[in-house]
Image: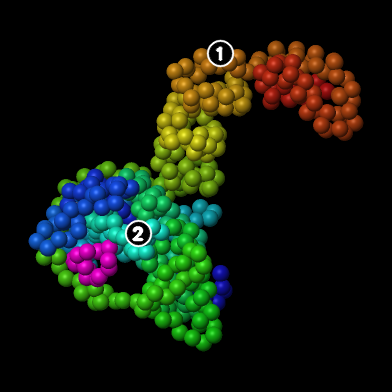
């Protein structure tokens, strides 16, 4: 980052909501169905049809608004945003202009070294998605799929409070984890469920006023958004350094060339000729509804991560990885709830390595791979020396493929019980040491690997079942 210029970023995130039906008609809201199989006269904007607002869309948007500390407008308005685009047959999009459903909120993002930063949320409004243009090699034309027309969206607009790539990344990840935590969007970037418009400007550090911004529309990956910010930051600095001025324009992020490219001079709100949607009434929400939705909001991932760091002393990276994923967090917390003597760091390690690997291999989710009861038992047995870590992993593999047997039964069947009886181990150690006097001398003469050899011999004598830490201590006692 330049030490002469500040980076200033605001993000507008469009998230598709996972309601059963679309926003203004009863067409199914589902990704990946046959082209043009879920559309009707309403969502394709045929003359004479009337939209009916899906109540769930309002509820979902309010949920996100409350989770991000927004004020909920009890009366809000729906407006037509007029523009022509081939995948928008109505030539207007129903959105919200001057009175959105939610406004003036904020979100605390977690940065390096457990620092947090508050990012303002200007507004969250509801709107409908447009269709999709399909380019195909088969024909020399562009085809249109209207299935996406009328899929409900929320647009989450941030204040220009983001000052670095790290902050932009943390903000995007936090928004994504909020959407999945609240169960209002599948947030699958690969299916286009989240897209963002990235606003970037730069200003000399001494300057108070913000510079002229450029907007990159419809960036559909987080990595693309971050690269676009980085590129744009440098491009604008280069212009200012060579005495030029920044033109306000809409650009696009081109993944192939890793550049932003100008597409048009930036339109202003008045270019869209917003006017109140005449076919829909204002949206009115009462206190009771807001209270009910508020009561359904769980502890959010960023707050969870901070709690894990403070209460459990988990490293920040682990805390974030667990907290940002609702199933990981549920497994982590339930396992700990069952036995508060467990080593939390060990629970976290198991979830982030052994269990994650299994989740990635299968299509199962975390709680299907292992129950908190079983995980808690395996970890407590490892902790008290009843079984070794490698035996714990063997048992885990067994219960993933067949969970009909209990853990205790598996330990018996597989003969994995660890020998932790100190007297029993001491006898074995004494016997092994007698037979390996040369290694003892080697060790005493500074050959440190002789110690490992002795441990290995003892493990062999116990058929791998001896508790290694007790064996090590006992050897040290005797040589
Ligand atoms: Zn429809």
Q: Quadrant of residue 117?
A: bottom left
Q: Nearer the viewer, residue 465 or 218?
A: 218
Q: Is residue 324 left or right of residue 345?
A: left
**Is residue 364 visible to the viewer in this orientation of the structure?**
yes
What colour scheme does the image use? rainbow
Q: Measuring 20% from the left and 74% from the top, which residue is drawn there?
A: 273
Q: Quadrant of residue 199?
A: bottom left
Residue 216 % position (x, y): 40, 69
Q: Quadrant of residue 415?
A: top right
Q: Is residue 71 left or right of residue 168?
A: left
Q: Nearer the viewer, residue 438 or 16?
A: 16
SS for callout 2: strand
The magenta segment is: 79-92
Q: Quadrant of the C terminus?
A: top right
Q: Is residue 44 magenta?
A: no
Q: Which of the two marks, 1 or 2, is nearer to us in this view? A: 2
Residue 463 % position (x, y): 70, 16
Q: Is residue 84 magenta?
A: yes
Residue 120 % position (x, y): 36, 63
Q: Quadrant of the N terminus?
A: bottom right
Q: Please tell me whether the stretch drawn in magenta is mainly helix, strand or loop.
A: loop
Q: Is residue 384 above or below residue 299?
A: above
Instruction: List the residue tagged with mark 2.
Output: 134
Q: Nearer the viewer, residue 156 or 401?
A: 401
Q: Are marks 1 and 2 in contact (CB under 8 Å)?
A: no
**Is residue 344 visible to the viewer in this orientation of the structure?**
no
SS for callout 1: helix
Which mark, by number, is residue 413?
Answer: 1
């Amino acid at each position: 980052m330049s030490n002469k210029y500040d980076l200033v970023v605001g993000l507008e995130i469009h998230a598709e909501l996972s309601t059963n039906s679309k926003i203004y008609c009863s067409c199914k809201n589902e990704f990946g169905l046959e082209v043009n199989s879920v559309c009707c006269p309403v969502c394709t904007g045929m003359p004479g049809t009337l939209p009916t607002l899906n109540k769930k869309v309002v509820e979902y948007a309010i949920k996100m608004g409350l989770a991000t500390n927004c004020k909920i407008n009890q009366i809000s308005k729906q407006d037509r945003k007029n523009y022509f685009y081939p995948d928008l047959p109505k030539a207007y999009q129903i959105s919200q202009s001057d009175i959105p459903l939610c406004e003036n909120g904020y979100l605390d993002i977690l940065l390096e070294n457990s620092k947090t930063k508050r990012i303002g949320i200007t507004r969250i409004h509801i709107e409908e998605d447009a269709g999709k243009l399909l380019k195909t090699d088969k024909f020399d034309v562009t085809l249109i799929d209207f299935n996406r027309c009328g899929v409900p969206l929320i647009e989450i607009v941030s204040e220009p409070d983001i000052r670095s790539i790290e902050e932009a990344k943390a903000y995007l990840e936090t928004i994504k984890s909020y959407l999945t935590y609240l169960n209002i969007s599948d947030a699958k970037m690969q299916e286009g469920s989240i897209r963002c418009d990235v606003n970037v400007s730069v200003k000399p550090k001494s300057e108070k006023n913000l510079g002229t911004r450029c907007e990159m529309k419809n960036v559909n990956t987080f990595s693309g958004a971050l690269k676009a910010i980085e590129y744009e930051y440098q491009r604008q600095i280069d212009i200012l350094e060579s005495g030029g001025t920044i033109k306000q324009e809409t650009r696009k992020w081109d993944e192939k060339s890793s550049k932003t490219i100008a597409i048009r001079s930036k339109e202003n709100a008045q270019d869209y000729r917003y006017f109140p949607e005449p076919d829909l009434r204002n949206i009115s929400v009462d206190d009771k509804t807001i209270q009910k939705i508020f009561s359904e909001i769980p502890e959010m991932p960023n707050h969870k991560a901070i709690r894990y760091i403070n209460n459990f002393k988990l490293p920040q990276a682990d805390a974030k990885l667990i907290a940002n994923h609702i199933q990981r967090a549920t497994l982590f917390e339930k396992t700990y709830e069952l036995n508060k003597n467990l080593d939390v760091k060990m629970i976290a390690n198991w979830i982030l390595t052994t269990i994650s690997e299994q989740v990635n291999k299968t299509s199962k989710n975390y709680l299907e791979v292992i129950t908190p009861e079983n995980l808690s038992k395996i970890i407590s047995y490892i902790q008290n020396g009843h079984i070794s870590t490698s035996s714990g992993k063997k048992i885990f593999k067994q219960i993933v493929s067949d969970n009909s047997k209990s853990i205790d039964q598996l330990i018996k069947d597989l003969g994995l019980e660890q020998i932790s009886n100190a007297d029993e181990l001491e006898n074995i150690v004494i016997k092994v040491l007698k037979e390996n006097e040369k290694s003892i001398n080697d060790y005493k003469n500074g050959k440190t690997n002789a110690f490992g050899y002795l441990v290995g011999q003892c493990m062999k004598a116990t058929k791998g079942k001896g508790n290694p830490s007790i064996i090590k201590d006992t050897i040290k006692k005797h040589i």
